[in-house]
Image: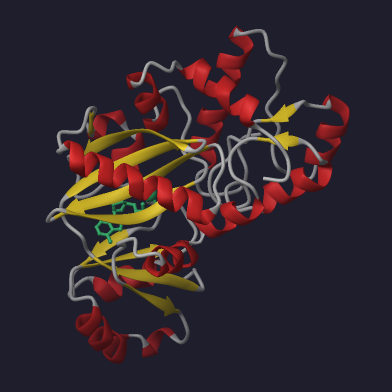
Amino acid sequence: MGGGFSKEREISLITAKSVLKALKNKKYKAVVAEPDGSLLNKIKSFRPNVVFNALHGRFGEDGYVQAILETSKVKYTHSGVMASYIAMDKEASKKIFIKNKITTPKYIKYIFGNYNKINKKKIIKIKKKLKFPVVIKPINEGSSVDVYICNEKNFSKNLKKLFHYKHILIEEFIGGREIQVAIMGKKKLGTIELVPKRKFYDYEAKYNSKAKTKHLIPVSISKKDLNKVENIALKAHKLIGCRGITRSDFKFFNGKFYLLEVNTQPGMTSLSLVPEIAAHKGISFIKLIEWMIKDASINR
Ligand SMILES: Nc1ncnc2c1ncn2[C@@H]1O[C@H](COP(=O)(O)OP(=O)(O)O)[C@@H](O)[C@H]1O
Ligand SMILES: [Mg+2]
């Protein structure tokens, strides 16, 4: 299953193509299905043993399509309905992190009402609680879509760009390093550091090789810190109730790891981060995909 209707459609199509190619090389019978009105008919006619979910973003990563697969009783990969929903909702997952003493950037939920009323009161509150710079982001998008780092001067201008969302998160800005951890089943798979040449790890830095983001494995941190960040990722994965593969995004600043989010449908192109982490552990792309297919089930 690939494509979909989210802003990450293009990335999902690349993930789907990579997975399809790897499976076909191994003589699996596979097709790519769009999660549209024809999905149920396709399931009926193709009768798959497993649906490999290569979708990203809304309707693919947030529990909706998982619910359709549950009711169709077809085995599928990655997390189930509830875990997908929670992980996709950055506010819901942050509440779980905070309750369980996992450090995450401080935040304010911002509900768009009458735009003219934004300015003064809200800015005073933000200044008090978060201090500038701040990061504004949609609650349930991915791939850094509509994520902006703002100072006091350009805050209102950037906020306007997110006006089409009903609500967003405003977070304190955490400097430092960009570290991500992959979890496979109930085990830590490994960790990678990203060093973007751009202002931050934005859409271009993630997907455009011309942006020249450096990928570092092994990450040069102490064994103790590595263990610490991997334990936090595993704890978050379990707390949310995730299954299969997840990838957690952290900022590492002043000796502290800040968990930004848990991705339940991380990119799976042959050049994505989880396959890169797996390769470093001696697990090839096809081995990773085959593990995911074996791990697939319903009642997730
Ligand atoms: N609070 C923050 N402080 C500093 N950088 C951040 C913060 N939140 C997000 N970012 C930057 O934006 C990127 C995307 O944010 P993230 O919360 O992971 O959303 P997405 O789901 O779009 O990946 C991060 O990888 C990081 O580079
Ligand atoms: Mg992220």
Q: Is residue 108 above or below residue 80?
A: below
Residue 22 at least partly seen: yes
Q: Is residue 73 above or below residue 23?
A: below
Residue 196 at least partly seen: no
53 left or right, relative to 276: right
Residue 91, image x and y in percent?
45, 67
Which residue shows up at 31% across the image and 62% down it? 104
- Which image quadrant for residue 121? bottom left
Position of the N terminus, as image quadrant, is top right
Which residue shows up at 29% across the image and 70% down it? 106
- Which image quadrant for residue 146? bottom left
Colour logic: secondary structure
Q: Is residue 62 above or below residue 28?
A: below
Residue 180, image x and y in percent?
32, 41
- Which image quadrant for residue 103? bottom left
23 left or right, relative to 287: right
Q: Is residue 218 above or below residue 202?
A: above
Position of the C terminus, as image quadrant, is top right
Residue 177, image x and y in percent?
18, 47
Depth check: 72 or 114 in front? Answer: 72
Which residue shows up at 56% across the image and 23% down it? 291
107 left or right, relative to 219: right
35 left or right, relative to 98: right
Q: Residue furthest left?
A: 254
Which residue shows up at 54% across the image and 43% down it? 56
**Number of marks in the rendered image:** 0
Residue 60, image x and y in percent?
61, 46
